[in-house]
């Protein structure tokens, strides 16, 4: 009766948006290790090709296709490409996201461009991705959608920081959580589970930008490197005392995408070392 | 390394594992390679449940134990450590819906508050108190508390069924808060603490709930308990299905494995989407 980990998702096909780097690449890697055939999409074909080459070298079946989640037609084309190439999509991981618009590293406050880009990528992108696969999943009689939100989309705690820059991002991620709840109800009659994973702080390009911003807009900081500030913050703000990794997020996605989670839907699961609790 | 599919000999203590949800958790974890210390207030029931796992090729060992008594849990933890050398995973599951006679009451009594808090809250505290020091010594461990989606915020306007279930729901909300606080307490020792919140399962507990609803609502008198249960599923479950003890076991297996090493202080509903968090 005991499965092996490579059987957890065997026979499944997964599509991971924003899968060429950061959290998305970690998710794609874990899903492949757990037996799924994995397609990734990302803005640049060159980034897709690099990830496909790396994972392909490890022996995994993987397909990369350039797509912009903020563009509905682009996402529809990507999904159609994946279905043509791999035959089906059982699992959608809507992961592609942005923190703020270009040049945010030097600003303490948000601007209109931040609201536009976080909404169009983090919210509408997740919607476009789901809408592109839903007809296919309905036709197949089931599926799994896992949205990557953020624990920043949960209720905030603490006192004023003098920086509002992160608000559009947090609001967009709260939107992803509510989208997850609502879509779960809509798709439950079709045997499609919809859940969210809320990562904490991971050392990715996004977090490096966020900590660079903190150093740039606040006085001095500790005087250490951006990475030192991040590590210090993890020790001080995370009960388990460490940041998470893209693979940690992948493990949670693998569970929610597996038959083991057939009765889990509409939920948002924090993977954040206990930094916020729900 | 363990993962959701393979717990690789992890020594797992489960309370209230003689039947219902606890038994389902024991089955699933055993199939995934855990060694099960199977505890129940009714030691005979623990023996029967352990034998059933052994027949299927699993490793399960029965223990008696009363979670409402700290000394009993201390003795249980010591016995398990003596036998297996360690406890890797603790599943606090033993729970009650109310005091005896619950089925026949519309409103709660003092005894319902005492029973639910004695077992569902203090029972979990006693069990954690007994096991945590062993885990702290080894700087590793997993604690999983079985709460309920009834411990989340209520929904809806109808309260025609009386308030007899309030003590249970309040106690399960307390389990969730206990999970949050214990997670912070034990994080420095690399011990994660999470809760699973089951939805609606056809177990001896729900048989009692169905009887109680028939007591409260004369219109339900003609229905069997199982029919009352199925109506509740149709009314409340987006996925339209009941959950099973094995569904809860599968979520526990994930949270107990290295796949969940960065998850702590969280409560996960396994309830077909009936309540969302």
Image (cartoon, coloured by chain):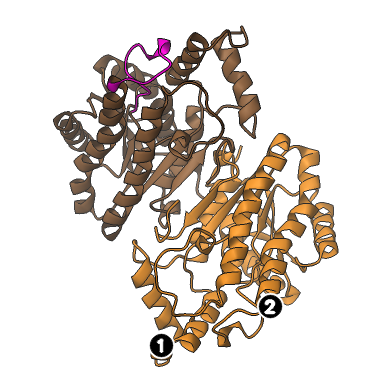
Disc 1 from disc 2: Cα separation: 27 Å
Which chain has been coloured orange in this picture? B
Q: Are marks 1 and 2 in contact (CB under 8 Å)?
A: no
How far across and how far down the image is residue A129, in percent?
25, 37
Q: Nearer the viewer, residue A188 or A174?
A: A174
Q: Which residue is under mark 2? A: B110
Chain A tint in image: brown
Q: Is residue A105 magenta?
A: yes
Answer few, some or many: residues within 10 Å of disc 2's Cα (few below 14, many 20 plus, some between 14 and 19): few
How far across and how far down the image is residue A23, in percent?
42, 27
The residue located at (40%, 88%) in the rendering is B220
**Marked residue chain, label 1:** B
Q: Which residues are magenta?
A: A97-112
**Residue at disc 1, secondary structure:** helix
Q: Is residue B197 magenta?
A: no
**Marked residue chain, label 2:** B
Q: Establish if B212 lies above or below B64.
A: below
Q: Which mark is on residue B220?
A: 1
Q: Establish if B272 lies above or below A64.
A: below
């Amino acid at each position: 009766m005991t499965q092996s980990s490579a059987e957890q998702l065997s026979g499944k096909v997964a599509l991971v948006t924003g899968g060429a780097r950061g959290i998305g690449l970690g998710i794609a890697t874990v899903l492949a290790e757990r037996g799924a055939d994995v397609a990734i999409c990302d803005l640049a074909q060159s980034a897709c090709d690099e990830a496909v080459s790396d994972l392909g070298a490890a022996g995994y079946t993987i397909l990369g296709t350039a797509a912009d989640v903020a563009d509905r037609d682009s996402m529809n084309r990507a999904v159609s490409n994946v279905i043509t190439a791999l035959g089906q999509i059982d699992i959608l991981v809507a992961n592609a996201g942005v923190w703020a618009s270009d040049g945010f590293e030097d600003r303490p406050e948000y601007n209109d461009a931040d609201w536009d880009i976080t909404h169009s990528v983090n919210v509408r992108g997740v919607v476009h991705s789901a809408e592109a696969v839903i007809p296919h999943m309905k036709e197949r009689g089931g599926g799994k959608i896992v949205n990557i939100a953020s624990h920043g989309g949960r209720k905030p705690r603490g006192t004023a920081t003098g920086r509002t820059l992160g608000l559009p991002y947090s609001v967009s991620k709260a939107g992803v959580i509510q989208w997850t709840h609502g879509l779960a109800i809509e798709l439950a009659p079709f045997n499609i589970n919809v859940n969210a994973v809320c990562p904490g702080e991971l050392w990715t390009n996004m977090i490096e930008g966020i900590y660079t911003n903190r150093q740039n807009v606040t006085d001095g900081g500790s005087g250490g490197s951006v990475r030192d500030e991040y590590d210090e913050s993890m020790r001080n703000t995370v009960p388990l005392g460490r940041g998470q990794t893209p693979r940690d997020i992948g493990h949670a996605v693998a569970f929610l995408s597996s038959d083991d989670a057939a009765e889990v839907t509409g939920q948002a699961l924090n993977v954040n070392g206990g930094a916020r609790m729900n | 390394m363990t993962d959701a599919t393979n717990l690789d000999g992890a020594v797992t203590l489960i309370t209230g594992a003689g039947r219902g949800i606890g038994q389902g958790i024991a089955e699933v974890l055993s199939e995934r390679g855990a060694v099960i210390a199977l505890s129940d207030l009714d030691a005979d029931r623990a023996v029967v449940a352990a034998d059933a796992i052994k027949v299927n090729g699993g490793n399960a060992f029965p223990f008696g134990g009363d979670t409402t008594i700290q000394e009993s849990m201390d003795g249980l933890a010591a016995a398990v450590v003596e036998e297996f050398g360690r406890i890797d995973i603790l599943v606090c599951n033993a729970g009650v819906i109310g005091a005896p006679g619950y089925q026949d009451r519309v409103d709660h009594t003092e005894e319902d508050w005492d029973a639910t808090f004695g077992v569902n809250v203090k029972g979990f505290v006693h069990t954690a108190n007994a096991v945590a020091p062993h885990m702290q010594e080894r700087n590793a461990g997993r604690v999983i508390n079985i709460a309920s989606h009834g411990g989340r915020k209520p929904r809806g306007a109808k309260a025609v069924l009386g308030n007899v279930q309030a003590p249970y729901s309040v106690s399960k909300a307390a389990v969730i808060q206990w999970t949050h606080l214990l997670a912070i307490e034990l994080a420095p020792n690399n011990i994660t603490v999470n809760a699973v919140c089951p939805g609606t399962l056809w177990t001896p507990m729900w048989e009692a709930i169905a009887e109680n609803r028939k007591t409260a609502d004369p219109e339900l008198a003609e229905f069997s308990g199982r029919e009352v249960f199925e109506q509740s599923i149709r009314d409340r479950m987006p996925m339209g299905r009941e959950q099973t003890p094995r569904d809860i076991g599968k979520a526990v297996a994930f949270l107990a494995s290295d796949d969940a090493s960065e998850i702590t202080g969280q409560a996960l509903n396994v309830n077909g989407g009936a309540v969302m968090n």
